[in-house]
Image (tube, grey):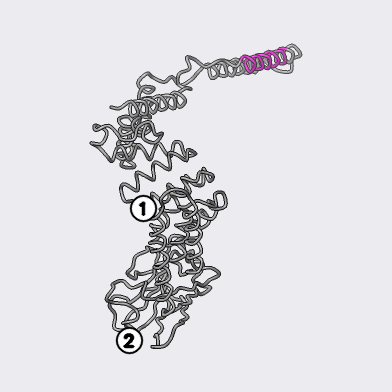
């Protein structure tokens, strides 16, 4: 048995014994203390009544027979009161022992039978076995766990999570926990850990930049409102931060704000060109990125702008974790010619404008341009609670709208729930 389990069950046993003693404490008294004040009153009343009887007998008000009968009755009542005040129900040792044994036993049975405690015991065992290793990893004392600690990776992960929650206000621990989740390809958990680290230490640029990058890639190259605000805050504190500028350029490109994207690239290129040293490779990469942005801008002008609105009845049902899907596909079904998955935060004021073009094609050979030339198309919009690409029961959707050959703008209203 591990020290944690031993300590837990020892404290439980002591608590149960204490409760048992409280319950049977009245039984442990050796004797009942007599109430002398009550007995004094009884004796005083007895003497007063005897004196009255003697006075009545001396005055001839009562005869001898009545006197003896009343005297005997008063003596009997006094003896009965004295016997009642001294009597109590004795409790045997067996009765006391039964109560003291059954209370801890029933408490233990209730704890063990009301639920499966296996996971709790495993967590305690993990804390005892690899708890110090987890703490050293989270505090940066070691970078790689010992080989023996990696044999049970689940125990090490559990110990690290428990350690972080026990030190919930340490931003660095949350940062290192996110690295663990990233290594396990658990992107949502890694992003949540980074979010907490950033809230705890908003002035730490390294944490802020890591959070913005993770959010960008977790959202398929899209900057949500939170990540964008984080980058803006970084650039406010450090206007020449190259990583933040590059991420803003990529995010603006993905959002279709090509003018802003090119402005960020030009700013970054000017800074790199003015710096000392050979930066030709970096400049060539930026020139290539700028050409790519201009190419995407040209393709986007041939796309379709979809205005997605959400009815007033549907708005209260939207959750922060939901995702917005906008697609253009054939009326006969099949894979979409263009599709975008956006965080639900992109819906502002009950609506969002989404641009779909050849850049949003799922396959290079199945573009929106080819679809408009050879097929009849419909535009769809859906809010998914699970974030999955396939429509599920409970999702919110709009009625599909047929896209004409020359039409470049479509309005959709999400107003129904998928059965």
Tell which residue pokes out farthest to the bottom in this image. 405
Residue 373's disc is 2
From this view, report whether residue 314 is shown above or below residue 153: below
Which of 328 and 222 lies nearest the eye of the viewer?
Answer: 222
Q: Quadrant of residue 105?
A: top left
What count of labels does the image hold?
2
Magenta-highlighted residues = 36-54
Q: Residue sitting at 45 percent across and 57 percent down? A: 246
Q: Measuring from the top left, give residue 389's x and y in whole percent.
A: 33, 68
Q: Is residue 30 magenta?
A: no
Q: Secondary structure at mark 1?
A: helix
Indicate the quadrant containing the C terminus: top left, top right, bottom left or bottom right: bottom left
Tell which residue pokes out farthest to the front in this image. 277
Circle 1 Cα neighbour tier, 10 Å, few/some/many (<14 / 14–19 / ≥20) = some
Of mark 2 and mark 1, the one earlier in the sequence is 1
Q: CA distance from mark 2 to mark 1?
A: 39 Å
Q: Secondary structure at mark 2?
A: helix
From this view, report whether residue 12 is shown above or below residue 372: above
Q: Measuring from the top left, give residue 377's x and y in whole percent.
A: 35, 84
Q: Measuring from the top left, give residue 256's x and y in whole percent.
A: 46, 70
Q: Residue sitting at 53 percent across and 73 percent down? A: 312
Closest to the camera, between mark 2 and mark 1, is: 2
Residue matched to label 1: 187
Q: Is residue 43 magenta?
A: yes
Q: Measuring from the top left, give residue 379's x and y in whole percent.
A: 39, 80
């Amino acid at each position: 048995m591990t020290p944690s389990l031993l300590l837990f069950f020892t404290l439980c046993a002591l608590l149960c014994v204490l409760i048992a003693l409280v319950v049977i404490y009245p039984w442990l008294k050796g004797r009942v203390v007599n109430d002398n004040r009550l007995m004094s009153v009884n004796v005083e009343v007895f003497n007063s009544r005897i004196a009255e009887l003697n006075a009545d007998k001396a005055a001839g008000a009562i005869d001898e027979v009545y006197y003896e009968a009343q005297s005997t009755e008063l003596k009997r009542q006094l003896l009965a009161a004295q016997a009642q005040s001294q009597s109590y129900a004795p409790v045997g040792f067996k009765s006391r022992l039964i109560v003291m044994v059954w209370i801890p036993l029933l408490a233990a049975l209730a704890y063990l039978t009301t639920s499966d405690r296996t996971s709790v015991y495993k967590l305690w065992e993990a804390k005892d076995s690899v708890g110090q290793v987890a703490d050293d990893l989270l505090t940066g004392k070691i970078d790689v766990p010992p080989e023996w600690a990696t044999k049970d990776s689940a125990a090490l992960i559990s110990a690290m999570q428990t350690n972080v929650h026990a030190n919930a206000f340490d931003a660095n621990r949350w940062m290192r926990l996110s690295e663990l989740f990233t290594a396990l390809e658990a992107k949502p958990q890694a992003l949540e850990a980074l979010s907490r680290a950033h809230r705890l230490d908003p002035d730490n640029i390294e944490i802020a930049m890591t959070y913005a990058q993770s959010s960008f890639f977790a959202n398929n190259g899209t900057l949500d409102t939170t990540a964008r605000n984080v980058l803006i805050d970084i650039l406010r504190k450090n206007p020449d931060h190259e990583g933040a500028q590059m991420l803003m350029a990529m995010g603006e490109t993905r959002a279709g704000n090509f003018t802003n994207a090119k402005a960020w690239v030009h700013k970054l290129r000017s800074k790199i060109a003015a710096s000392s040293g050979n930066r030709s490779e970096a400049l060539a990469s930026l020139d290539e990125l700028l050409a790519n942005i201009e190419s995407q801008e040209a393709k986007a002008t041939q796309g379709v702008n979809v205005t997605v609105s959400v009815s007033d009845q549907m708005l209260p049902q939207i959750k922060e974790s939901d995702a917005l899907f906008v697609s253009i596909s054939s009326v006969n079904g099949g894979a979409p010619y263009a599709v975008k998955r956006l965080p639900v935060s992109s819906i502002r004021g009950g609506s969002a404008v989404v641009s779909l073009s050849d850049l949003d094609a799922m396959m290079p050979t199945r573009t929106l341009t080819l679809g408009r030339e050879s097929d009849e198309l419909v535009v769809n919009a859906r809010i998914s609670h699970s974030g999955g690409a396939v429509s599920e029961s409970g999702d919110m959707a709009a009625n599909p709208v047929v896209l004409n050959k020359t039409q470049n703008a479509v309005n959709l209203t999400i107003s129904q729930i998928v059965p």
